[in-house]
Amino acid sequence: IKPCNLTGWWENDLGSKMQVFEVGKDGTFSGQYHTAVSSTKKPIQPSPVTGSQHLDEDGQCTFGFTVNWKKFSDSTAVFVGQCFNGDDGKEVLHTSWLLREKVDSELDDWKATRTGHNTFTRAG
Ligand SMILES: O=C(CCCC[C@@H]1SC[C@@H]2NC(=O)N[C@@H]21)Nc1ccc([N+](=O)[O-])cc1
């Protein structure tokens, strides 16, 4: 089984793309996230990714990463998930995410976090 390594280009079910640069010996990585969707009016820009993965031999590692929507939204997303090696040899990442937008008042804190899930496959 191919060991798990997230380096490369991924695409999710929303059409967002993520490029993971090389993964360090300690499993940490950085990259760029090109979201296909946003709930801001500002133009979407590639945003920095930082994360860490397990270096399992069995190719089915767990990982987490954070996206800081630097330029176009005062918000942050964290993704957590696992890589699966399909029987067809294709890798798939099943993830859940929390998206935290900045709110101006503590009274609005209750409505500031959204959650969801995304599946990623290797971009063509
Ligand atoms: O719009 C944004 C920034 C972009 C978020 C993209 C999300 S991350 C989880 C999901 N998977 C993806 O590939 N893309 C989406 N931030 C934002 C702006 C406004 C508000 N708001 O509540 O107003 C909340 C978040």
Image (cartoon, rainbow, N blue to C red):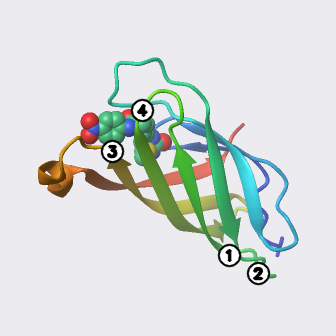
Give, as a three-letter code, the residue at label 1.
Gln
Q: Is mark 3 within 8 Å of ligand 1?
A: yes
Residue 87 visible, this orientation: no
Q: Which residue is mark 4?
A: 73
The mark nearer the N terminus, 4 or 1, is 1
Inter-mark Cα distance, 2 to 1: 7 Å
Label 1 sits on a secondary structure element that is: loop
Other residues around mark 1 within 10 Å, as few (<14) / some (14–19) / many (≥20)? many
Circles 2 and 3: CB distance less than 8 Å? no
**With 109 as the anchor, is 47 left or right in this view?**
right
Q: For mark 4, give the secondary structure.
A: loop
In what quadrant of the picture does the N terminus appear?
A: bottom right
Disc 1 versus disc 3: distance between alpha carbons? 31 Å
Of labels 2 and 4, the one closer to you: 4
**Image: 80 above or below 75:** below
Q: Residue at x 51, y 66 (%)?
A: 80
Q: Position of residue 91 (x, y in %)?
A: 68, 60
Disc 4 CB within 8 Å of nearest ligand 1 atom: yes
- Mark toward the viewer: 2 or 3: 3
- Kindly identify the amino acid type of the residue bearing the numbered disc 3: Glu
Q: Earlier in the sequence, mark 2 or mark 4?
A: 2
Asked if residue 12 lies left or right of residue 23, the reply is: left
Residue 16 in view (yes/no): yes
Residue that badge 2 annotates: 56
Mark 2 lies on a secondary structure that is loop
Label located before the other in sequence (1 or 3): 1
